[in-house]
Amino acid sequence: MIIIAGHELVDAKDRDRYVAAFSELVSCAREFDGCIHVAITADSVNPEQVDSVEVWRDAEALNKWRMRAKAPRTKKPKYSAVRRYDATDGGSLF
């Protein structure tokens, strides 16, 4: 399982537009084979922060998606801290 998670900072006045620009990409990713979950959302505390998380079945599915995905044209974030994690196990939280 591959997890991509983190956040980016954009101007507060641009944040909602920035998040909305990714809605079609998120919808397409969620229907793509191997996608377990994708979300790009406005942070509930910091008005400049955009949180993102992707969970993929495996690297092959992620790579196939990356070859097909067309990210929207947006202003470059002021800061980005998004990382890839390779998970070897998962299960119920409770």
Image (tube, helix red, strand yellow):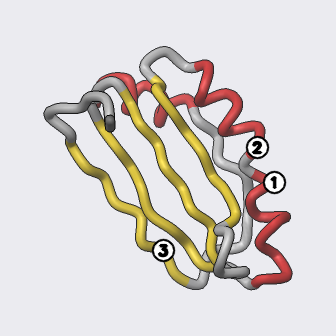
| Relative image position of residue 52 (x, y in whole percent) | 54, 55
Q: Quadrant of the C terminus?
A: top left
Q: Position of residue 23 (x, y in %)?
A: 76, 43
**Which mark is first along the chain, 3 or 2?**
2
- What label does residue 8 carry, if any? none
CB contact under 8 Å: marks 1 and 2: yes
Residue type pointed to by label 3: Ser
The residue sitting at the left extreme is 88
Name the residue tied to disc 2.
Answer: 23
Q: Pick whichever of labels 1 and 3 is earlier in the sequence.
A: 1
> What is the residue that sits farthest to the front in this orientation?
94
Disc 2 element = helix
* 10 Å crowding of disc 2: few (<14), some (14-19), many (20+): some
In terms of image quadrants, where is residue 51?
A: bottom right
Q: Is residue 43 above or below residue 34?
A: below
Q: Is residue 17 above or below residue 76?
A: above
Under mark 1, the amino acid is Ala
Callout 3: helix, strand or loop? Answer: strand
Q: Is residue 67 left or right of residue 45?
A: left
- Residue under the point 76% across and 64% down: 18
Instruction: Name the residue beneath numbered marker 3.
Output: 80
Q: In this figure, which residue is indicated by the disc labeled 1?
A: 20
